[in-house]
Amino acid sequence: MSPFPYRLVATDLDGTLLRDDESVSERTRDALAAVVAAGAAHIVVTGRSVPWTRHILDDLGYDGLAVCGQGAQVYHAGEHRLLTSLTLDRQLAGLALSKVEAEVGPLALAASRDGLDGEVLVGPGYRVLGGRLPSVPYEDPSELWSAPLNKVYIQHPTLSSDELARVTRATVGGLVDVVMAGEDIVEILPLGLSKATGLSLAARRLGVKAAETIAFGDMPNDIPMFAWAARGVAMANAHDELKAVADEVTSSNEDDGIAVVLERLLGR
């Protein structure tokens, strides 16, 4: 085998490391194990908050650091411990939402509460990833703001996710950050937060630099991570905005796209 040229492999979860059934293939597991054996670290970098990520990491036997919540949380999977967590200014988020609704009309809302066991609150009309992930419904709008939050999710009855993200960014981009993380997943985050900020914190803990990092992703929320890393690899199923800034496009998440690249870099 050739020496592996990177010290850090950063992978998104949904649409990237995970297949559509939320499993990870043996080929991809073997490729990641091989790069770790070669001296590199593997970090999961996901938009999901810790409570929506933890069960997947446990199933993988993953015991390293994970960046969750679009960079808001650095989580030690082996110790089941939250190392850092950034919360959203709720007053600022409420102002941002009122400005967006003045432009496009009523939004369906959900929000991710802070902490290891932070619940995801889901308001009337909000659609949660086909209902696969645990959430708590609410009716009283005040419930949404009653505890610290990492982010707020927004949906619109007629606008696509791309359209909603564009309008929201144009309307309140100076107050909060706005990302499109998947179909029906538009998120309002603390200003300046991205996967890159969380990944840089985790990398610093490992003593690894951006120039030593290769990153894999599939959605526009991965763009800052690609800008930070030395090399960004988009999946074949990736959003066009991410493909436009990627250094390389690999196979899809269903076709072991991560393994294809890692095996080549290992000289297999």
Image: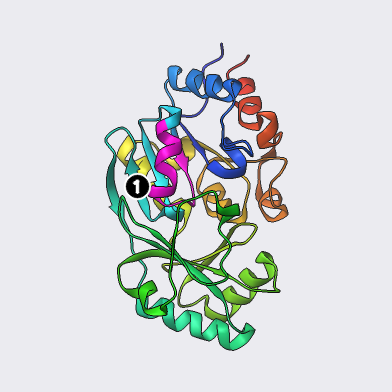
| Quarter of the figure with the N terminus | top right
Give the quarter of the image for residue 186.
bottom right
From the top left corner, tell me how far across and down residue 117 is, in percent: 32, 51
Q: Which residue shows up at 30% across the image and 55% down it? A: 115
Considering every residue shown, the one lying at the far top of the view is 1
Residue 22, magenta (yes or no): no
* Total tally of numbered discs in the picture: 1
- Give the magenta range: 43-58
Q: Residues within 10 Å of mark 1 (few under 14, many from 20)?
A: many
Q: Which residue shows up at 35% across the image and 30% down it? A: 63
Q: Which residue shows up at 34% across the image and 64% down it? A: 87
Q: Taking 143 as reference, is 251 left or right?
A: right
Considering every residue shown, the one lying at the far bottom of the view is 102
Colour pattern of the rendering: rainbow
| Residue position marked by numbered label 1 in the rendering | 74
Above or below, 2 against 17 in this view is above
Give the quarter of the image for residue 148.
bottom left
Q: Secondary structure at mark 1?
A: strand
| Quarter of the figure with the C terminus | top right
Say which amino acid is labelled 1.
Answer: Val
Q: Nearer the viewer, residue 113 or 170?
A: 113
From the top left corner, tell me how far across and down residue 21 is, in percent: 61, 37
Above or below, 144 against 75 in this view is below
From the top left corner, tell me how far across and down residue 123 is, in percent: 49, 70
From the top left corner, tell me how far across and down residue 263 is, in percent: 61, 20
Q: Taking 144 as reference, is 108 left or right?
A: right
Q: Which residue shows up at 44% across the image and 48% down it? A: 52
Give the quarter of the image for residue 42.
top left
Q: Nearer the viewer, residue 161 or 202?
A: 161
Residue 57, magenta (yes or no): yes
